[in-house]
Image (cartoon, grey):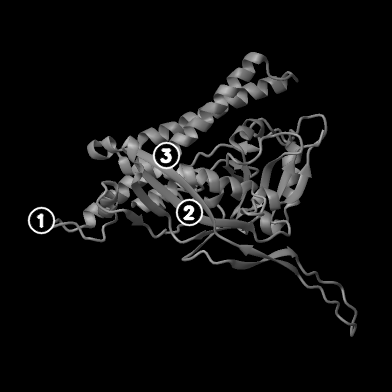
Amino acid sequence: MSDYVKRQTEERARAWEQAKALLDSAAAENRDLTAEESESYAKINADLDARAQVITKMLADEARENEIRSAIAGRPEARPDEALPEGDLNKALRSFLSGESREYSMPLEVRALGKSTAGAGGATVDTSFSGRLWEHLIETAQLAGIATHWNTSKGENLEVPVTTSHGTGALTAEAAAISASDPAFAKRTLGAYKYATLVQVPRELLDDTAVDLEGYIARQAGRGVGNAFGAHLVTGTGTSQPAGIMTTASAGVTGGTAVAGAFTADNLIDLYFSVIAPYRNSGSAGWLMKDATMANVRKLKDTTNQYLWQPSLVLGAPDMLLGKPVYTDPNVAAVGLSAKSVLFGDLSAYIVRTAGGVRFESSTEYAFNTDLVTFRAVVRGDGILADQTGSVKCFAGGAT
């Protein structure tokens, strides 16, 4: 672990102490933050988020470098007259990028990617182009890295039973008939909706590049596809697109009126306990919200005057809210009237299905008149909340 990453973690902890000092000072005087204090608080919040992003990126970069070193150390030294193995992914990719081959198909190596721990995040990312492309997709479609992930070789429809209620037991007298109480199911078809993006690169860059071209294309293609797929995984309607987790989550808590959809500490505590213990105490239970919502969350205290939100002091681990990890996704609604701005529950109850790997193709004819090489990335997938009995619930702002 680099000293730089450790310093960033320490600076983040110090920034949080500064934010608490501002909030505590205003609370002790029973007043709101002044304009100057509000500006300082906003800057501190931005600093907290920026340092978290730097830490995450640095950990992922260090993990990739370590894997590359390990791979090089374990590879027999090649003689000058020996070529790399034909199956080498990086060689195939470079041949594709230079125009020697027209197509580069990649099997998608599915891993339990996430930012919750170093072991589930950067340390598991494959060093191949396929892994980098998928990693950048996950950075945008955050939910895809947290939910349960199914990958199938083809895109045929999958019939998935969705639990809508559980059976119950009842006190029964001796020799009396036992009442039937069956769980209720609905059937949902998981399809394979297509998400695609085009990336165009000047021929001069391909011919003369001294930069990380593979990384550039992976970022552009992964984020392009991830932006489209990720939005529907969160808020999709379920009609001709995935059924988003916010769309199908159960109602948990509704905020008060005349507060523009804002939530209180009591609202979030009530939301936490509205999810029953088996889901609430699950190892995959967590919060999902927008980055901008975090500024409001960090101000909240419980009845013992303790802040609900706690920054992570462990490298690679997420921040915590009421003892559960907080994940952010840009596609979750902002705080507002009737807006579903916060979700809590067992996030593994949401299933993300992808069909096969990422299809990646190129064309020199598409933009022939501008001498651009066009790359196309395509991924097919769907999503559904498989357990709709209250495994995840959401906070919705008041209607007025």
Q: Nearer the viewer, mark 1 or mark 3?
A: 1
Whole-percent x and y of residue 37? 63, 17
Residue at left offset 41%, top offset 48%: 376
User: Amino acid under label 2?
Assistant: Val
Give whichever of 242, 112 is nearer the camera: 242
> Is 264 rendered above or below residue 115?
above
Q: Which quadrant of the structure image shows residue 165?
A: bottom right
The circle drawn on residue 79 is 1
Q: Is residue 372 left or right of residue 36?
A: left
Is 393 displayed left or right of 150 in the figure?
A: right
Q: Is residue 316 visible?
A: no
Examine the rendered structure and indicate whether residue 374 appears above or below residue 356.
above
Q: Which mark is residue 379?
A: 2
Mark closest to the chain's N terminus, 2 or 1:
1
Among the two numbered marks 2 and 3 on one chain, the one whose residue lies closer to the N terminus: 3
In percent of width and height, residue 104 lies at: 34, 55
Residue lying farthest to the bottom in this orientation: 175
Q: Nearer the viewer, mark 2 or mark 3?
A: 2
Q: Which mark is residue 347?
A: none
Few, some or many C-alpha atoms within 10 Å of disc 1 (few <14, some 14-19, many ≥20)?
few
The amino acid type found where label 1 is placed reads Arg
The part of the image, by quadrant, that contains residue 25 is: top right
Q: CA distance from mark 1 to mark 3?
A: 36 Å
Read off the residue under disc 3. Answer: 57
**Which x, y percent locates residue 343?**
67, 46
Q: CA distance from mark 2 to mark 1?
A: 39 Å
* Residue drawn at 78 percent across, 38 percent down: 255
